[in-house]
Amino acid sequence: MRRFTRPVLVLPSLKDREPAQKPKTFTGHWTNPDVRGALLAMQGWVCAYCGVDLEQHAFDVEHFRPKGNVTDDPGHEGYWWLAYEFSNYLLSCTACNQKQKIDKFPLLPGGVRATAATRDQVKTELRALIDPAADPVEDLIEIDTSDKLARLRPKPGITPSQEAAVKETIRMLRLNRSLRILRGRLRALERAVGAADNNAVDRLRIRACRHRSHSLAYYQLLASLAPDQAPETAAERDWLIKKLVRALAQAAKILDNGGDENDERQCAELVWAAAVLLSLGAPVDAALSSANLEAEKLLVQDFAAGL
């Protein structure tokens, strides 16, 4: 898990969508290309919870606060008024979303759950789940490098409530029990240790980018070896842009050779991701031009102008 910076956006699919009352069914506007693309621009292809590579795993748009009901509080109607709120979305692998998180949203002891009537108090809930788009994850969680399985643990010195939230997040999402997650994290830690032993700071810096899978292992060792060399936001976005443009070039090539509806949706997601990055000041235009994606460049500029 890493901290992501959520862009402040009004996306076409979500504009004026807040329901006046809980609907009987929810229309999945959050699956539209503009929403998924904006989340790709925020996270890259990394699960917000377990850190696996989403290019290798199926993934969903996850509602951080459950929209329909709350497992931890059967009498609660769910955070239905946040169903179409971009600030309530994360990209998550289907295992974390559909098997672990599901409709859970625990609070710390003494916490009062917000309702539709008290929705203005939602940000003051004493939640027991770390939000990777709001909380200082790297200051709260660390890998136990002395542990043979590279398990996560709360960082020393945090507050008791923060420690309780970290422990509950690890437990609920099975971040120290899923073999799939443990294997990936342990492999990343072994490679990070190898790079550190060779004083390969540049390799650590590249892999410590928050948009790369299991990057906490590299970030943590880099912080201990050369704390002033941690990748800056601009460098991380530059890496993400390059990866995004490569993916967009491949998608455009597939469409030119007769892609299907799914290919068109994926291409649209990538265009929206590039548009969001451009709206944030990232140098996307030059990257698109260098990849001979002139038509896509015009789409990106058009979409970005509307954000």
Image (cartoon, rainbow, N blue to C red):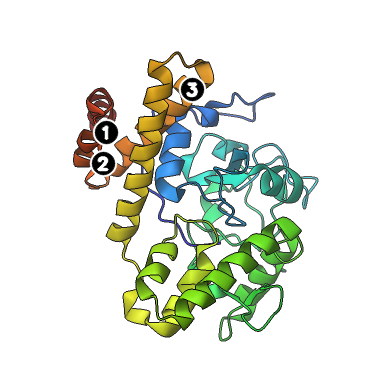
Residue 233 seen from this side:
yes
Disc 2, SS: helix
Image side of residue 152 versus residue 256, left or right: right
Q: Which residue is mark 1?
A: 304
> Which residue is pictured at 34% across the width and 53% down the height?
239
Q: Which sits earlier in the primary sequence, circle 1 or circle 2?
A: 2
Q: Which sits earlier in the primary sequence, circle 2 or circle 3?
A: 3
Q: Quadrant of the C terminus?
A: top left
In this rendering, is residue 230 above or below 241? below
Q: Are marks 1 and 2 in contact (CB under 8 Å)?
A: yes
Q: Which sits earlier in the primary sequence, circle 3 or circle 1?
A: 3
> Which residue is pictured at 63% across the width and 39% down the height?
58
Q: Which residue is mark 2?
A: 278
Q: Are marks 2 and 3 in contact (CB under 8 Å)?
A: no
Q: Quadrant of the N terminus?
A: bottom right
Residues 56 and 46: in front is 56
> Which residue is pictured at 78% across the width and 48% down the height?
71
Disc 3, SS: helix
Q: Which residue is mark 3?
A: 263
> Which residue is pictured at 48% across the width and 35% down the height?
36
Residue 188: where, in percent of width, then height? 57, 66
Amino acid type, residue under disc 1 in the picture? Ala
Residue 42: where, in percent of width, then height? 42, 48
Q: Which mark is residue 216?
A: none
Amino acid type, residue under disc 2 in the picture? Leu
Disc 1, SS: helix
Single out the residue that lies furthest toward the right.
Answer: 74
Residues 199 and 52: in front is 199
